[in-house]
Amino acid sequence: MKSTVAVEIVEGIATLAMDRPEASNAIDDALRRDFTAALRALAADEAVEAVVVTGMGRSFCAGQDLREAAAMTAARVPEWQAGQRAMFQSIRDLEKPCVAAMNGAAAGAGFQVALCADIRVAHAGVRMGQPEVKAGIASIVGSYLMTLHLGLSNNVELSLRGALIDGAQAQALGLVHQLVPPEEVLPAARRIAREMADLPQLAFRLTKRRFREMTQIGFDDACAAGARYQAECFAAGVPQRVLAQRLAERKR
């Protein structure tokens, strides 16, 4: 079976690309497993000095796969959320530089992947945010991750309204570090990764480790809360109905 991620390593810089372009790189069970395994392997590979995370095609990652979510049951939520947590934790555990090259839309879980990276590079046309509430899914882990970058007021607006913002708005809020032309997103991300990899790495690793230690309790709590609240959402059947309707509309 074809992997849902593609890995390229050039001069010590690994590019890990989510590779479901036909689905806008939406995250399903296979992508969660493949991404987590690939990133853990890169973390253990001494030849890899830094990692750039991106998406194949026109999207970075559209978030949760709609077909998978539409078929979700409350009983399956713990396994789903555990896989999601492992994916995010693999990024958090990486003690090498990690740069998100946001080449296109980054929504929901895809936005959260980017938020777990050290540095985010995008172009002005990228749309990103937390639209879960519009699908009847509680915004729990995403709202927590945004607390690490935003004040409460902006977090509440993005989490509760579910609107997507563009790259310029995201940069103004501090969610994106650099805006470049679309064709420069990946090269710029690789340059930044190279610059970070050339820093004294013991100091880099220890500083990054301390950031993880400072936020791990909050992240663990958010993941546990996410499992509880998503089980309640899916037990009520609202996400399944909303997403089934969206899928039906796409077929028309």
Image (cartoon, rainbow, N blue to C red):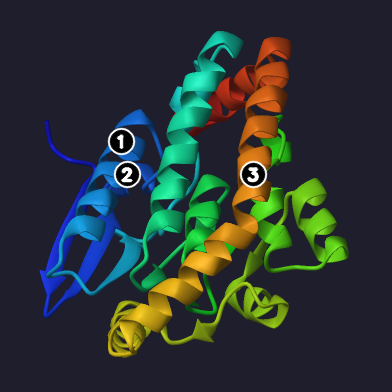
> Mark 3 highlights which residue?
141
Rendered-image quadrant of the N terminus: top left
Q: Is residue 101 left or right of residue 30?
A: right
> Mark 1 highlights which residue?
33
Secondary structure of the residue carrying tag 3 is: helix
Q: Residue at x 34, y 63 (%)?
A: 54
Q: CA distance from mark 2 to mark 1?
A: 5 Å
In the rendered image, the residue lying farthest to the right is 153
> Mark 2 highlights which residue?
36
* Residue 152 or residue 166, whichever sits in front: 152
* Residue 49 or residue 191, whichever sits in front: 49
Q: Residue at x 67, y 41 (%)?
A: 222
Q: Is residue 44 left or right of residue 83?
A: left
Q: Quadrant of residue 225?
A: top right
Q: CA distance from mark 3 to mark 2?
A: 17 Å
Q: Residue at x 64, y 31 (%)?
A: 224
Residue 119 in view here: no
Q: Position of residue 140 (x, y in %)?
A: 70, 41
Q: Residue at x 57, y 30 (%)?
A: 246
- Amino acid marked by disc 1: Arg
Q: Residues within 10 Å of mark 2 (few under 14, many from 20)?
A: many
Vertical arrangement, residue 164 with respect to residue 81, above or below: below
Q: Position of residue 58 (x, y in %)?
A: 36, 61
- Callouts 1 and 3 close, C-beta under 8 Å: no
Vertical arrangement, residue 43 with respect to residue 37, above or below: below
Secondary structure of the residue carrying tag 1 is: helix
